[in-house]
Image: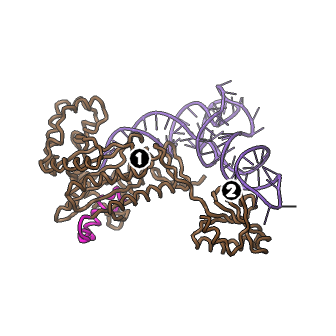
Chain colours: A brown, B purple
Amino acid sequence: MSSFKSIPGTFDILPDGQTSGGDSIAPSRVWQHVETVIRQVMALYGAEEIRTPILEPTELISRGIGQLTDIVSKEMFAFERGGTNYVLRPEVTAPVMRAYQQHHLDQRGGVQRLFYIGPCFRAERPQKGRYRQFHQFGLEIIGATDARADAETIACAVDVYRALGLNDFKIRLNSLGDAESRPRYKEALIAYIKPFSDQLSEVSRNRLESNPMRILDTKNEKERLLLKNAPLLVDFIDEESRLHHDEVKAHLSAIGLSYVDDPFLVRGLDYYSRTAFEIESESIGAQGSLAGGGRYDLLSVELGSKKVIPAVGFAAGMERLLMALEAAELVNIPFGRLDAFFVALGDEAMKWTFPVAHALRAAGIKVGYDLSGRSMKAQMREANRQQARQVIIVGDDELASGIAQVKDMDQSTQRSVPFDQLTNQLTDKE
RNA sequence: GUGGUCGUAGCUCAGUUGGUUAGAGCGCCAGGUUGUGGCCCUGGAGGUCGGGGGUUCAAGACCCCUCGAUCACCCCA
């Protein structure tokens, strides 16, 4: 047992995967597979990958988040060094917008579709599907106000899930209106709730001051009843936003995507406007949200742009996606088989093996051999464990004759192959 | 930060009302076959029973503390 352990809320991705308590971390090949599918789907949307640093200036994030600066100090990994404030990125939208502005990506021309896959960090207490180092992927469409962009981000996320075989999800959709809509709505909501605030839970009562819209998220049945006749955000949004929302829904319908209009779906941050959506899985418990996103036209201004750069995107969690895939038993990525495994008998044969194996690898053949000088039986067992299709047996006799014994492990048949024909024959075999 | 549950081999777990050398299955290593894998048989390695303290003639079991894991609350940009 080693004396060092990975930091709580972080985990290793291993060749065979691992289980830690209730959670199981998928094998690395499953992660690779999911990432490959994400890249394929993104390619279908003409999206290019963007990789931004994991370290960002704290200011970038706190600007984005606005006045809620205790989030920065309590919920994020932030530190100061040499007078500069750094933060491990808690999400990727703000960094992407930063990069867009820094490198004038609008000058590439047209609307930018940018996707990312990578780690993010939050200093919260870990729980199922929530880690301190977690992995997100997402798509940002920057430079378009068109409602098709909103619908496209949703479609793209859904396409990723479908490409992986997931069909068990639900799309919730809402419109947050423009920058003026929410203050108006907040006022009305508080006015509605105040009269019976003494019937609310302590938690919700505190929210009444800090973040009244989050009360709508309550899971408490009694509170849900009280909220039954609460004013709805939809009734407070501006006409243009309403039209935009209708368009988004029409576009979704046009591609046969069903959604649930959820007037209670809200976003805490001020730079969000119009479209907000969430994609949930039924099968992964309390942390059921697979992906979320929406329109954030005002972020660019928050980050210092003189003009509004319209943008919409989604962000999705890899861990939760993998959990959902596992729950649906869609994660059978086979172990990568070796084409051939050398069984070398004796020192001379072992020496001979190395350059030959190297040459086969150069020819694109996946080969392995024993590195611990073990018995033939042990080498055969190793070949079997690695599921090698064939075994190349070489001992003193073979070295003398220049002819190897090649055994097909699936058929249990064996044949003689001259050394100089090994590459050809193994290539044909595949 | 708050609450629930749980810590015994690499993994999954047994360990009877406290009783003497702490077990199983799988995995790993080796032998059975001095040049042939999977199946089978035999053997081996691997545990300060999370850590510390206490009760007792005796603690993996009981008590206290502590650390860790996990689920949930808070939070969720």
In this view, the mark in front (1 or 2): 2
Viewer-nearest residue: B31 or A330: A330
The answer to whether residue A430 of the structure is visible from this angle is: yes
Viewer-nearest residue: A127 or A332: A332
Give me the chain letter of mark 2.
A
The answer to whether residue A302 of the structure is visible from this angle is: no
Per the image, label 2 sits on a secondary structure element best described as loop
Q: Are marks 1 and 2 on the same chain?
A: yes
Quarter occupied by residue A35: bottom left
Per the image, label 1 sits on a secondary structure element best described as loop
Left or right: residue A16 versus residue A40 is right
Q: Position of residue A87 (x, y in %)?
A: 35, 60
- Residue position for label 2: A411
- Residue position for label 1: A166
Q: Position of residue A4 (x, y in %)?
A: 54, 55
- Which range of residues does the magenta coloring cover? A86-111
Viewer-nearest residue: A349 or A59: A349
Q: Position of residue A44 (x, y in %)?
A: 35, 60
Quarter occupied by residue A360: bottom right
